[in-house]
Image (cartoon, rainbow, N blue to C red):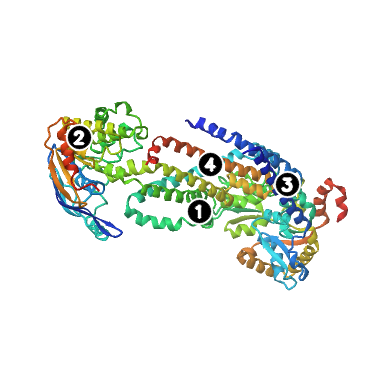
Amino acid sequence: MSGRGIWLAVGALAAAAAGVGAVVAHRSAGTGAESGLAAATPPAFRIGYTGSPLLAALYLAEKRPAWRGTDELVRFETSADVGYALIAGKVDAGFVEPAKALLIRDIREFRDIDVIGKVTYPYGGILVVRKGLHLRVQDLPGHTVAISEPGCKLYHALKKDLAWLKVDEARIRFEQLPFDAMLPALEAGQLDAAMTKASYSVLARKLGHDIPYVQLDIAAGDACCPAVVAQTEFLLLARRPARADARRLGQLLLEAQKEGDAALRAATQEQTAIPLAVLEASPSAVYSFADRLLLELFLKVEADEGAEKVGKR
Amino acid sequence: MIEAVNVTKRFAAPGGLITAVHAVSLSVRAGEIVALLGPTGCGKTTLLELLAGLQSPTEGSVTIDGVLALPPEPADPEALRAHRRRHGLLPPVANGLFRDRPRHDVAVVFQDHAVFPWMTTLRNVTFALGVRGVPRAQRREVAVGALERVGLGAALHQYPAQLSGGMRQRLALARALAVRPKAVLMDEPFASVDQATRERLQDLVLELWRDTGVTVVLVTHDVAEAVYLADRIVLFGAIPGEVSRVAAVPLARPRARASPELAALQAAFATAPDER
Amino acid sequence: MTVTRAIPRALGRLLRAEWLRVAVPLALLWEVIPRTGLVPRTLAPALSDVAAAAVQLAVHGGLARHLASSLGTLALGLALAVLAAVPAAIVSGWNPLVRRHVLPYVQVVAPVPPTAWVPLTIVLFGVGLPMKVFLVFLGAFFPTFLNTYQAVRDTNPRYLAAARVFGASELSLVIHVHFWHALGAILMSIRTGVTLGLVMLTAAEMYGGRAGIGFLLMQAKEFFQIPAMVVCMGVLGAVGWTLVELLGLLEARLSVWKDLEHQR
């Protein structure tokens, strides 16, 4: 390849880079909606979600008359995928797990994204035992059990009850895993049991595992993890231009919740194909608008980057 | 030693059936050198393979040393499949399934020598010996002896790709003769080498023939070669697949290539209407 | 040429002047363009970000552990595929009866894209090691089988006749003629199988189990670590390249006698 060829290649690459830049600039300037049809009908409001049973209010809201024809549910594999879609403008709002939401915040485009509301679940711990093993708490010695960390409140609650039942705790093999990794590891056969958050109870039962131990008498929150985050299962995030629609959605969710657990469960069963019996064994999650505490948690970190942001709310 | 009685071979082809060999009867005596002489495409290769027991005739029979080589099989593919199914024959030659089973004491040297390129010179010969049932302990010795006889003693561990054409042909010869067959059948073995090498190889064959008394059947289109080597010449003539005549070569050995008697015989055979 | 000398030699081949002339400007662009902010740097990392993530993964992220897991699963799946495909293909190529009973099934199942097997495999095997090994096996089996089969069918009948005339049994023919004659094609088919096996390994690791480079890739995606994703892709590419080079080495060993084939 001669010298001229090199310059040609460099030139082509530069042109490609410029093209990419142009596309991105255009994207972040627009709302992400189809500009052609915008004149006649209101633009589509797309909501990203993962099909979790905890989003019962959303599924019920979709069936109610207040739901607009232009409101659209878009399903994703994981809430990280919802996050990517939100960043790219492919959805206007989405339900994202708090840990992921914090990571999204670290990506620069988050300055365009607002926290609208949260979905919470009663705090507590459950011991999920892999299907087929049929272990009781007393049978745990000799098996592998996952915990999120040595200081975890749920783990301490379990230890207390193990001592009360005179179970030989030393013979239990404890392994550390993040909460959302526990069920997949259980499925893969790498664990025998997991001490995880009560919010996973529906999923655990749906997969066919046993839950021999439930401890809901635990106060959420500790020094490193405030209650508002510990209990929060999803955050409703929205792109700033779609803020109004997102608040409207929040209202729809509050209305839907008023219809009661039975209606919520029926809608969840339709959307996720989880059997009613499994749904009825667990309490429902609750949507509420983001409160001061939650916003400060997010705002606090944003304020570090530039104080002028605080006033915008 | 090899008897062909009224042998016919037909092949199935897109147009119908082709007759490669038609009603040939031939008797090869032990210890003699017979040349099958004719132009390309006259069926002499097919006849050679029939005589070696590599192909089965459509009609007629071939016996090697008194034992039937292969029973006749129909040429039409449908009939052939039915025939094989009935007799449980694995195509195309029913050697043993798991155990090597030499059926006849013949060896073949092919036109394109067909030495195995993935085996060294030595291994090519020891493989043949192994198939023939020579005990492992003796194989190397016999193989080395045979290779030295043909002048390949220095190339024992080379691969055929590293040998010249003439050397490969010598390897094929050594492999065929190492197993001490009663008959060796050669299909235009020296066609692909130059004249000087060809003459040397012909003399080598004569030498080996003299030392071992092996029966030789040689296919060639070179009249000079046939006249130089053979005791009898089987001429393929105007009609493909048919023997026009069998003639004896009454010259005593050693024969001189440039002698007038040889030249005269060459001329006699050459004028036979077989040049196409 | 021993293995320990061959890899550095192959790398030396890579670092030739021609390759460098393209690679260095590309690397510079990769470093500079993300820094200009045309695309957010967190979504399009610069080369230095990727390098930093690579170090991070290697030191803290257990990169070596996951790489070992991936290689182990790959080796197991490939070994099973080769052990199953090569003999079956040789026998199918050798004997029309076997061929008639085996080949149709292979030809019907082979065109199914291996990734389409993932859901069924998860249902049958769960999401542990057996599922991953099975998917790698599926990816590698069909190309290996079909190419080996074809090579054996194309065995020069001269060699078969030469062996038969000495009285070789069918088994001797398979071992001493068919196999060696087809060896070049067998290795080439294994090379294709390795590439496809690697694809399936990545897919399998993304779906289940909790080890391997594919898993690391998914984790990086889940936690918005784009540079780590790039590192994983690079590692996978390096693994594929190394395996192909190693197989090429083996094939080169054969060229000692293979030349004769091409002279015909």
Q: Amino acid at mark 4?
A: Leu
Callout 3 touching callout 2 (CB < 8 Å): no
Q: Which residue is disc 1 drawn over?
A: C125
Q: Is residue B185 left or right of residue A142?
A: left
Residues flagged by tags 3 and 2 on a common chain? no
Residues flagged by tags 3 and 1 on a common chain? yes
Q: Which residue is disc 3 drawn over?
A: C42
- Residue B12's x, y, as percent? 27, 57
Give the foreground label among 3 and 4. 3
- Residue at point 84% right, 48% down? A303
Callout 3 touching callout 4 (CB < 8 Å): no
Residues flagged by tags 3 and 4 on a common chain? yes
Callout 4 touching callout 1 (CB < 8 Å): no
Q: Which residue is disc 4 drawn over?
A: C71
Q: In the rendered structure, which disc, 4 or 1, sits on the residue that comes first in sequence?
A: 4
Q: Which residue is disc 2 drawn over?
A: B180
- Residue C44's x, y, as percent? 70, 47
Q: Chain of mark 1?
A: C
Q: Residues within 10 Å of mark 4 (few under 14, many from 20)?
A: some
- Residue B148's x, y, as percent? 26, 27
Whole-angstrom CA distance, mark 1 to mark 2, is: 60 Å
Whole-angstrom CA distance, mark 3 to mark 2, is: 80 Å
* Mark 2 element type: loop
Q: Residues within 10 Å of mark 2 (few under 14, many from 20)?
A: some
Residues flagged by tags 1 and 2 on a common chain? no
